[in-house]
Amino acid sequence: MPGHEYRAYINEDKKQMKINKQKERTRLIKNEEASLFAFCVALLSQYFKIEIGLPHTHSTKTVQFANIKKLYYENDYLNVEDFVVNKLQELAELDRKDNIPESTISRRVQERRRKIMKEFLEDLLFEYGIIFIDSTNRVTTINRTSICTYKLKQFNHEHVMVNGRKIAEMIEEKVNKERNCFFEKNDFDHFPVQIRY
């Protein structure tokens, strides 16, 4: 029946539009996460020498999420990579205890890796008096992050996203050339990431 085929076509089209809308929203969230993370890297470079390696997954459709290996300070270092791997293993063990399938555990790894690294950097920056304030937009349900110190609002959401994206692109370009590279304070001097006290 022609009417039935037309309705099926319309329903299929609506379904595809919904899938595309969800994919676009996911990309937007990933771009914002990667931009915020890159901005955190630039802020952290004021206190640490940062070793960044090739990313665990490579994306051409979203901003690349930096893969921090180690943070160096004075004569010591923090092994971020080991910290993240240990956290991922702990979470995987908890999932196994809850009888979650291995395929689901594997699928969660990259998202969890990003979340662990982001929270780790935010905690470190908090030690230096830098605070992240998230406010969720009720319509889009996307976080709007601003960065503050104890006394001053430093950077609004737009500033973080625009400059974070540029920083992420700069990091990606350098990592693609050198595979494993180091970033220090002066590497980000041409970006407006200086904290005012």
Image (cartoon, rainbow, N blue to C red):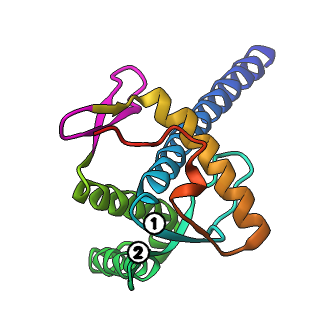
Residue occupying the far left of the picture: 150
x then y, percent, for residue 35: 53, 44
Q: In this view, does 162 lie above or below 84?
A: above
Which residue matches tag 1? 113
Quadrant assignment, res 20: top right
Q: Is residue 114 magenta?
A: no
Please tell me which residue is depicted at 47% across the width and 36% down the height of the picture.
160
Which residue matches tag 2? 84
Observer-nearest of 22 and 40? 40
Question: Number of numbered discs present?
Answer: 2
Q: Is residue 49 left or right of residue 98?
A: right
Q: Is residue 173 above or below residue 1?
A: below
Q: Is residue 197 above or below residue 107?
A: above
**What secondary structure is found at the residue carrying circle 2?**
helix
The amino acid on which the numbered mark 2 sits, given as a three-letter code, is Val
Q: In which quarter of the image is the N terminus?
A: top right
Q: Quadrant of the C terminus?
A: top left
Quadrant assignment, res 182: bottom right
Q: Is residue 115 left or right of residue 133?
A: right
Of the two numbered discs 1 and 2 on the same chain, state the one appearing first in sequence. 2
x then y, percent, for residue 43: 43, 51
Q: Do the residues labelled 1 and 2 touch (CB within 8 Å)?
A: yes
| Residue range corresponding to the magenta coloring | 131-152
Please tell me which residue is depicted at 60% across the width and 47% down the height of the picture.
167
Distance in Å between CA atoms under marks 1 and 2: 7 Å
Observer-nearest of 65 and 170? 170
Q: In this view, does 112 lie above or below 197?
A: below
The amino acid on which the numbered mark 1 sits, given as a three-letter code, is Arg
Please tell me which residue is depicted at 69% across the width and 57% down the height of the picture.
172
x then y, percent, for residue 130: 28, 47
Q: Is residue 137 magenta?
A: yes
Q: Residues within 10 Å of mark 2 (few under 14, many from 20)?
A: many
